[in-house]
Image (cartoon, rainbow, N blue to C red):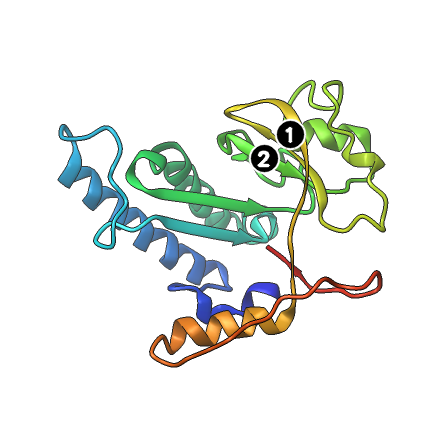
Amino acid sequence: MELAYGRGIFHRYAVTGRQALDVLDDLLDGMEARKALFAGQVRTVPISTDYPLEILEFDEIGALTKYTDRKTRDAITEKIALLTTQGRALGFTVRGYVQEPTKDTVPVRELFPRRICLRVTAKSHVSMVLGEHAYERGAWANRITESEAGVGYVWGEGIREPLRIRAGWVPDQVVKDLETFLMHPNQHHCAVMSRPSDNQEGLAA
């Protein structure tokens, strides 16, 4: 529902398993093309307008890596594994969002080198999301209260100790303004962001 609200922001958009496979195949084709072009020339593809950073927002990743038919599930898992293991140097990034952080739900969990854990109900979930010893190092995501929306911990590659963070709050209208701006770049737009009151809800980005 959240991504559909601002779907015009995205270049590609998928809902069903079949559509997701089409998007993944498109990204893999692009990745292979860059690999063939830059292999032996550079270690990391320079990001430019010709070769932009491709970001795949996968929400909810568990819905398609567990709660779908086996053939589709296996194909999606395989393609995500290819993108996460080969894509970074080529300018392809995968962001996966999940509510159930078990290995059974996300079999490629270990291929995400940097992770964020928002409020969880059990201490064991912290290690599932952030990795071994994260809780002992201070990532107490199970202690986050319901009133602390957007608060979480980030840990992984390049981060020595878990960091407590808070995601910015983005009003629904700002999402729509951004969508309109991207779909009609020649028009003039103005968006204003405000701080929410304690009982306001919105999108986090």
The residue to which callout 1 is attached is 130
Q: Residue at x 68, y 66 (%)?
A: 194
Q: Is residue 187 left or right of residue 51?
A: right
Q: Is residue 170 left or right of residue 57?
A: right
Q: Is residue 39 left or right of residue 70?
A: left
Horizontal and vertical percent position of residue 13: 44, 64
Q: Amino acid at mark 1?
A: Leu
The residue to which callout 2 is attached is 115
Q: Residue at x 85, y 51 (%)?
A: 147
Q: Is residue 56 above or below residue 175?
A: above
Q: Is residue 199 left or right of residue 77?
A: right
Q: Is residue 54 above or below residue 159?
A: below
Marks 1 and 2, the one that precedes in the sequence: 2
Disc number at residue 9? none
Horizontal and vertical percent position of residue 69: 54, 53
Q: Secondary structure at mark 1?
A: helix
Q: Are marks 1 and 2 in contact (CB under 8 Å)?
A: yes
